[in-house]
Amino acid sequence: MRQTVLKLLAPTTGTASLVAHLAAALLVCALLLFALHRLLGPRGRRWLIAAVTFAGGLFYGLEYFLPAHGKPEKNFLTPWIEPVSVALTVVFAFTVGLGIYSLCQVHGRNVGRRRPGWHNSLAFFAAMVAMFVSGLWEHHLRLPEPLPAVVPWPKGVYEVLFNGLYGPLQAATFSLLAFYIASAAYRAFRIRSAEAGLMMAAAFIVMLGQVPFGRWLTSWLPAAGPLGSLRLEVLGDYVLTWLNTPAQRAIAFGVAVGALAMSLRLWLSLERGTFFSEQS
Amino acid sequence: MAQAPATGSWDYLQRMPRYVIYLLLAGVVLWQLLAPIRFPIVPSSTTRDVYKAIRAAPENKLIIISVDWDASTQAETGPQTAAVIRACFESGKRFALMNWTAPMGAKLANDIARPIAEQYHAEYGRDWCNWGFKSGGANVLMAMVKNIPETMGNDVRGKRVTSLPMMKGVRDIKDIGLVVEVTGLAGVTETWIGLVQGPYQTPLTAAYTAVMAPGYYAYTDSGQLKGMLVGVKGAAEMEVLERKPGLGSAIMSAQSWGHILILALIILGNTGYLLARGRARRERA
């Protein structure tokens, strides 16, 4: 059975086979969704989602906790890890499709009704179509690496859009943070209280300890001995490892306990969220 | 939001317009990129540990470099990735690039790895490979620890990973000697620790953006992480250990002077604040 499932989920090669697989998958999914939609009421859907969620969590939990034997070590659930992961990847792909559909719906409405800022929505469609077409085309070309001296124009278009536009835009957006942080640090760091003074002292030590300039500032102090512990890089290291680490660990413990509780609630479908609250 | 106009010189010190700060920072960074004033870079203990972990990885096992970053953090994670790749080639360790969170990382890291491989006369498929981006989040790691070839399927060049000579004998996580996680995303390391390092004792080391690194000292302290590279500083320190100054070292002087400028601005702001407060007190008296 596992082999049949794996065969069904295995990547296919060849255009005709791919198209046939896609059409068949779409048809089966559409029929399945239609049938579920018609046959199950809100209560039934809720139970179905809860059952699938519980089974999924139980599968991974049991596979992880049940004793494993042999070489490579495995229990009776281990061989199913791979097909289940592939199936999950397919579900993830559906969520991407759902996201795209939702975006198109929102931006399509903006353009159709000429809402304020509709031209931004139009830019979204232009960017999405351009990246989608050039990305698929480039992938279809299957160019060898290293690339030939002269590349086909679809590859050129893709490189301009991805490396020349998308990458730099993303980098530029993130780079702006440096300016905001500089401005925010200048405005927010005021010694209004003893605590603020303490925080500033720690910030100064860590900032200077992290750059070669700070190290150079106190390089005249001997590296060993009591005076050596006053060197900025040593003080910075002290703040990060002795003061920061216990605090971070405490936060991590808190987050982990919270995550465990939340995971349990999700697994047992106690966390209803928007979908179920709308249903009821 | 409009800023209140500065009424006196003390007020100006604490209410300097934003554009002045932006221009000063841009000027300092540009100046240092064009005519750097360099200070000696001394590798920290966390960087030394990363370098040691790469060199200590068993010859007969693969190193995984998980490049979970994209263009937004490339200024830091790019030089870090280059430094880690160089350390692998230098010590003759075979490595595979992979990516399971930010899809762009597989391509950007590939662009970094290719020219470095040429410098070391390393061959794709024999000395290094790129498994590419694998969708599925943590499921990728869960499946990978049990069966690497089936989970990875094809590499970025569309070849089955099993067809690559370096993948001969690589079956599961036991055939991995070290995982190097290069990321600008929070939560990625925790997944590696929970699913790989903890249950299978696979050595794990990491490279983070400077802003997220303080959250991970707890893991180096516990020994779950064999060292870490902190921001571009970590990359520069690796370059010092490799005796090959590169992009990390070049960026370091700009970062150093950027820090100095920010500290100077904070001091100026506080000087203005304290003097203005003193004057207000005197006027009240």
Image (spheres, coloured by chain):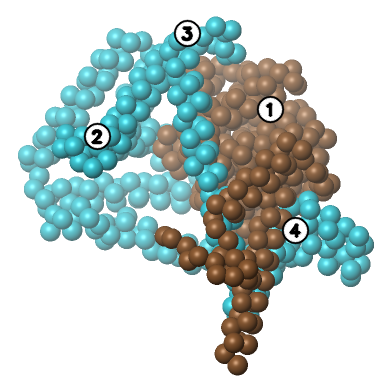
Chain colours: A cyan, B brown
Between residue B229 and residue A17, name the one nearer to us: B229
Disc ID at residue B30: none
Q: Which residue is mark 4?
A: A209
Between residue B267 and residue B72, name the one nearer to us: B267
Q: Which residue is mark 1?
A: B94
Q: Is residue B253 left or right of residue A80?
A: right
* Label 1: chain letter: B
Q: Which residue is mark 2?
A: A104
Between residue B45 and residue A158, name the one nearer to us: A158
Residue type indicated by callout 4? Gly
| Distance from Cα at disc 1 to Cα at disc 3 | 33 Å
> Which is more N-terminal, label 3 or label 2?
2
Q: Which residue is mark 3?
A: A152
Residue type indicated by callout 2? Cys
Foreground mark, 1 or 3, reads 3
Residue type indicated by callout 3? Pro
Foreground mark, 1 or 2, reads 2
Q: Position of residue A176 (x, y in %)?
A: 53, 46
Secondary structure at numbered mark 1 = loop
| Distance from Cα at disc 4 to Cα at disc 3 | 50 Å
Residue type indicated by callout 1? Arg
